[in-house]
Amino acid sequence: MNRIITDDNVNISFKHTRSNVACSSICILAHGITVDMTEGGIFDRMAAQINDIGIDTLQFDYRGHGNSDGKSKGMTIAGEVLDLSAVFNYCDNIGYRSIYLLAASFGAVSTSCLPFYYKKKVDKLILWNPVLNLKKTFIEPLLPWGKESFNKASFEKMNETGSLFIDGEFEIGAALVNEFYLYHPEDQLKEFDAPIMILHGDKDTYVPYEVAKDCSESLDNCTFKTIAGSEHGFGRIEDEEMVVNSTIAHLKS
C-alpha cells in the first residue's frame, strides 16, 4: 500500500488510480469516521465511475482508520486536517491542474476546516451527508445514532477513562470530543469559492438533514440535492445510483 507522510510524521495509506486517458485532473475522496477509504464500498464504485470520465482518483485512510498509522483513540480533527493537507500536497507535487474533492459524512469536517491555502486549490466540491454542525451531531445530538453513543452516561464514562465508544466499538478520545466545541464546519465552508454540491438523504438518522439544507441556502455557490427516503450512506441501490449520477454530472459541468 502506498504511503504519504504528513507534516507531523504520520504515515497515511492511499490508493491513486489513474483513468484510461492522460489527464490533468484528480478527485480526492475523503471518508467518514469509523470506516476506511472504501466508505463501505461506495467510494470504490464511485472512483471507478470518476475514472471512466477521464479523471484520476485518490482514496486514503485518515489516521486511526484503515491501514494508516495511529489508533482511533488518538484521532483528532486537527490531525485529519493534516492528513488531507498532505494528500493535497501529493497531488500538487504531481502537477494536477484541477483538484476536485468529494467528502462523505465526517470527512466534511476536515474538508471544511482546511487551511485557506488548500481551499483555494479546490475546483469543485461535493459533500455527501456532511457533518456540518458538531454540536447537533455529537454534543447535543438531534438524531437517534448520535443519542445512542453521545449521551450523559457515555460522557461521564469518558471523563473517567478518557475514551468514548461509537456504536460500542470504535474508540475515540476526549481530545476529539473537546474539539467538537471548537470547530464550526458550517461557517468555515463559506471560505470555498468553488462550486459546491451537497447531497443528503431526508431520512438520515445519523447526521441532520436540515442542517445541511440550511447551510446550502446560505451559500451562493452551493446547490443542494435531496435524496428522498434515503438513510445515511445511501444504502439502497436507487439512492446510490442517484448520488453517483449527480456527482458525475457535477464533475462534468
Image (spheres, rainbow, N blue to C red):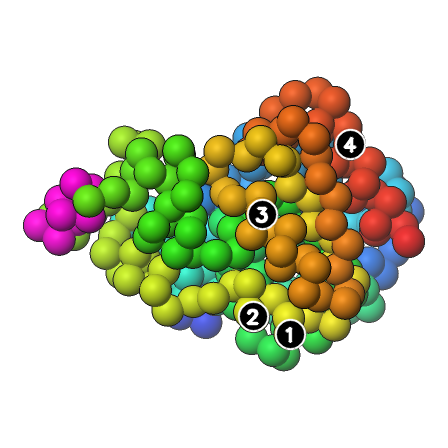
Q: Is any part of residue 114 visible from this angle?
A: no
Q: Nearer the viewer, residue 82 or 237?
A: 237
- In this image, 129 relative to 171: left or right? right
SS of the residue at dot 3?
helix
**Which residue is outermost to the top?**
237
- Provide residue 154's location: percent of width, then percent of height: 20, 42
Mainly helix, strand or loop, the magenta region? helix
Question: Which of the two labelled residues, at mark 3 and mark 2, occupies the earlier sequence position?
Answer: 2
- Provide residue 76's location: percent of width, then percent of height: 36, 59
- Which residue shows up at 70% across the image and 30% down it? 228
Whether pointer 3 and pointer 2 mark residues with C-beta atoms closer than 8 Å, the reply is no
| Tag of residue 251 | none
Rate crowding at label 4 as few (under 14), some (14 to 19) or many (20 or more) other CA atoms within 10 Å.
some
Q: Which residue is mark 1?
A: 191
Q: Which residue is mark 2?
A: 188
Q: Is residue 228 above or below residue 29?
A: above
- Provide residue 51's location: percent of width, then percent of height: 81, 42
Whether pointer 2 and pointer 1 mark residues with C-beta atoms closer than 8 Å, the reply is yes
Rate crowding at label 3 as few (under 14), some (14 to 19) or many (20 or more) other CA atoms within 10 Å.
few
Q: CA distance from mark 2 to mark 4?
A: 27 Å
Q: Which residue is mark 3?
A: 210
